Amino acid sequence: MALIIDYPEERTAEVKAILKSAAEGTEYDRPIRIILVSRQDRQSWLKILNDPGYPNFEEIRLEAKPYLDFEDAETIAHDVMEDYPGSIGRRGKIRAKFLPDWLNHDPVHRLPLNVVAASVHAVLFPDRAFSLNGKGVLSALADFELRRVRSYSERDLGARNALEKLLALSLLTPTGLGKDTIHELGESGICEGKTGNHLLEAVQATPFWRKRTATQPGHLVRIEPDLPAAAFLTKALKLDDPPPGLAGWMAPAAAEAKEDFGDILARVIADIASFDVEAGRAVEQVSIAMLDTRPKLLTPLYRIAYRPTSTFSAKFVVAICDRLLALNQPDPTRAALLLRKANALIAHGANSDALSVIEEGIDRFQALDGDGNDEIHANLGLLYRYQCNALFKIGHLEHAEWAIHDSAQYFEQLFRNNPERYAEDYAATLDTFAAICSETERLEKAVSYSAEAIRLLKEVDRLRPGTVKEAIGVSSLNQSRFLLQAGRHGQALEAIDGSIEIFKELSEGNVSRYKPMLIQALLNRGATLASTGSYDENLVALQEAEKLCEPIAALHPVVFLPQLALIELNRSNALMRLERFQEAIVAAGQAEENYRAALGSSGDATNSQLAQAMHNKAMAQYLANLHDDAVLTVNEALELFQETPDVSKGAQNIVSGMLADFLHLKAVNLFALTKVESALVAIAEAVATLEKLQAAEPERHIKKLCAFQEKQYEYLVDLNRVGDAYEILVSVMENAQAFSWLDAEWHRKVSDRLHLKYMQLCQTMAVPADPKFLRPPAPFSIGPVDVSPPTDDFQLSTYTFSYDLNWLGDFKL
């Protein structure tokens, strides 16, 4: 006999009770196998159960496929349409002529749940078979279920909407609402005309009540599967305009869920946000209001503060930490809560707020560090790493490096003393060090630190299989970036594909935690493919990332709008490479709009990123021969450079380089409009800006400077200013010759291209040619100079830091 428990990590108390009951039993008629369909590995469960001695506790890994291929999806749909009508007493064949188009329209339609849901909808409503999108299918199924539930509610409860509210609230618990919770909800007035025991008796008469068993008390069923249940909750609780009593109704359900409520809340918000962003935000806001409605909830919920934090539950975790910190806590508990609050603040993008919390946390832990306690040192190491992450995200690279040095000092010593326990945290510190090195152009060090981090994690995985899968995925994601920046394209693609495989598998079980990481991995895969010229494949990866990112960016703009904008920015690059210029204009415009919105919401976006989006838009407009539009876009972008530049190390050089690019782009568009004098002014400004940069970093800017000077030469020739053109051309040739050691092939091409022009100018001006420029030119062809400067235009995602480890003691109120 098999007992199967789905999402057992949200039902830990029930699982413990079942295992205890099975262990204490003396005789059974037949063998019992308990199957936990879990998203956590064996080692995690041994920790949860607090017993390493289960001899028959096995782990069997299942392959997770997010999207079905067409053939499998079609087979499932036909099976449902053939079998389901008989089970509900319907006859007749369902017309499925729209099924192939519906399956091919959107990969989301080939999610197993959506295939089944749409097929059921086709049976129930044959005239509208396969005419809805994913959201429409969920909404239609929720409406159908609501009608069914209301019939029982009117019959047994004497109130049309009471039962649907109770079933919706059951989704916020691990197994469904218990007797005490329903009694409390009855007393709160959730069902007009029935309170307390009268409501409980009425609910027990419905088909949704599950009677008491040897392992579980009686309860109202927890509706499944997740997405249709989330759609049902959205409608039943009227999340488009939440009723005033909703926070009070949620409180008993949350109290029943206890420490599991944080994970359940994150998953429910993520599910709802996938089809209704505002409803997802409403659940988040009501859950926080609930804490003020019922202050005593802190007692059953306080452990949520010490659990791993998802972006979707981060604000709720901050709210719990704030309320706990407002109490008179002992110093160890206060320090631990500050650490958890800092992590949650970073998770939802409040990096500046996190920094002040981190500073207090560091002070508290240092005051406790009298005997060199390992756990205190581990927590200090975490806080310094969180400090580094927050500083990194707001652009303070130098201070971020100091912070990660402090973190490394703690974790290196801890790792040497106890390698098995602290290997993962030491690897995370090395990973963060690598990111700092990458940003400060120490690429070989970045690759080296990253490789060591992954080596350590794979050694841990060998000893404890499956326990560090997330950490390996994160490190592989970051490593792909370092390898790509170092020009190792094949290795970068291998690393990012491994990361995507991990996060696709993990996100199947915990979408709220791993979906953001999967988005970053897809974004990096796109950039890696672009570096090899595979722009069609690059576009596919970016489109998949965009589809995943849009709903969560709407729900949490501070964190994810910059990421969505970056995806759109890279998509505009791919479309330009594929000569789909109008689409590129639209994509760049979307990136610009989202960067502006992110700047308004105090997110991680910067003026430099906004300027990059506007540069792409103007470039696409130029390539589409929309030169007037391009000039307007450039002029608007140039206004950004009158504002306060981004605060970061080297930011002024970055801003100046972008300013030169914009002036160059303005010049080529003005020249295309035959406004040659204006074009010359713009290109002269671009050259002057680059000359200042080139004086400080000559090797970095010389190629672009020469390209811009060539453009300046062309405009002077067009205006018949031969003497000025001669001076500029000589300057280009001297610069190229002076830096021939930097790139011999580049020097040869420049010399070959300009030699004939130089000789013609010497003849026109009747001046002797300089002997150092006299040499036979190699074969060459005259063609247009590339408008875009030689920049690395496909950008990667932000780094992923920290595995949210928690080396905290079990601090109690």
Image (cartoon, helix red, strand yellow):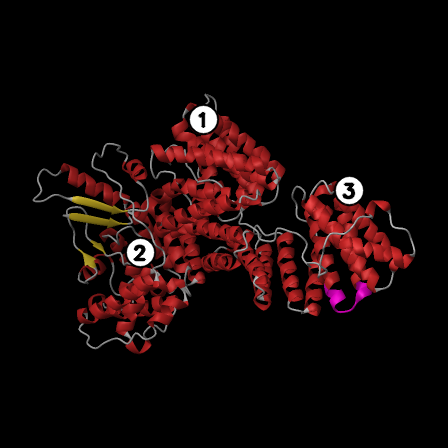
Residue highlighted by disc 2: 171
**Which residue in the protein does label 3 denote?**
738
Tell which tag, 1 or 2, sits nearer the viewer: 1
Q: Which residues are magenta?
A: 669-678
Question: Which quadrant: the C terminus?
Answer: top left
Q: Quadrant of residue 390?
A: top right
Residue 156 located left or right of residue 446: left
* Residue at image location 36% in from the left, 44% down from the top: 301
Query: Left or right: where does residue 134 sit relative to residue 94?
Result: right
Q: Nearer the viewer, residue 727 or 753?
A: 753
Vertical placement of 320 versus 126: above or below? above
Relative side of 368 to 16, left or right: right
> Which class describes the residues within 10 Å of circle 3: few (<14), some (14-19), or many (20+)?
few
Rate crowding at label 2 as few (under 14), some (14 to 19) or many (20 or more) other CA atoms within 10 Å: many
- The answer to whether residue 595 is left or right of residue 2 is right
Q: In the image, which is nearer the foreground, mark 1 or mark 3? A: 3
Q: Nearer the viewer, residue 775 or 54?
A: 775
Res. 292 visible in picture: no
